[in-house]
């Protein structure tokens, strides 16, 4: 559990350091808008969230959906962006916390690793909605 907490603290710091060397041509808020995470999850479960970035800090909220699109929980999203990388933390209304470390693979797609306590990490694709 301590290693997960250290990872959650270290990733944003690392991205902020990388941000100092960021791409000058990157849009100021490349990730702004609504996203759907979990497009490749066989159960059909997914997470819908809206985010925006100001000075590299990401903020937003969303909803988690289970089987057959049933709402499961509300989510607060925080993180950091250093184009083309983004690190997001999802705080669930249930108290659970998940992370998503991804890279932009196009203007409307993110590809990265989704980690949720008690489950193995999952490579996951997100698309702008």
Image (cartoon, grey):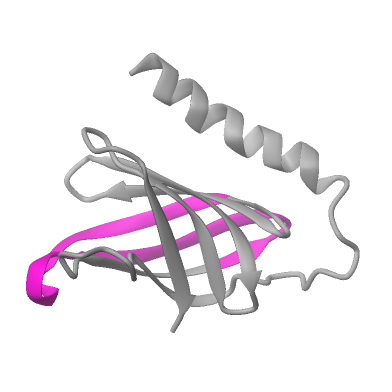
Q: Quadrant of the N terminus?
A: top left
Residue 71 lies, in percent from the top left, at 13, 69
Residue 79 lies, in percent from the top left, at 54, 49
The answer to whether 46 appears left or right of 107 in the picture is left
User: Residue at 67% of width from left, 72% of height from top?
Assistant: 30
Q: State which region is magenta.
A: 52-79
Residue 114 lies, in percent from the top left, at 39, 49
Residue 28 lies, in percent from the top left, at 76, 70
Taking the magenta stretch, the answer to whether it contains residue 53 is yes
User: Residue at 67% of width from left, 33% of height from top?
Assistant: 13
The answer to whether 66 appears left or right of 16 in the picture is left
Which one is in front, 20 or 38? 38
Please determine whether, in this image, residue 115 is positioned above or below residue 82: above
Which one is in front, 111 or 72? 111
Most common secondary structure along the magenta stretch? strand
Q: Residue furthest top?
A: 2
Q: Quadrant of the C terminus?
A: bottom left
User: Residue at 46% of width from left, 76% of height from top?
Assistant: 127
Taking the magenta stretch, the answer to whether it contains residue 74 is yes
Which one is in front, 92 or 68? 68
Q: Quadrant of residue 119?
A: top left
């Amino acid at each position: 559990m301590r290693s997960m907490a250290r990872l959650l603290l270290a990733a944003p710091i690392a991205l902020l350091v990388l941000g100092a060397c960021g791409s000058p041509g990157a849009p100021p808020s490349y990730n702004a808008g609504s996203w759907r995470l979990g497009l490749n999850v066989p159960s059909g479960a997914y997470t819908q969230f809206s985010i925006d970035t100001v000075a590299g800090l990401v903020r937003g909220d969303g909803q988690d959906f289970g089987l057959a699109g049933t709402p499961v929980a509300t989510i607060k999203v925080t993180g950091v962006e250093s184009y083309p990388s983004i690190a997001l933390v999802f705080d669930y209304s249930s108290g659970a916390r998940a992370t998503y470390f991804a890279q932009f693979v196009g203007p409307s797609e993110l590809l990265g690793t989704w980690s949720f306590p008690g489950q193995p990490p999952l490579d996951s694709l997100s698309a702008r909605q």
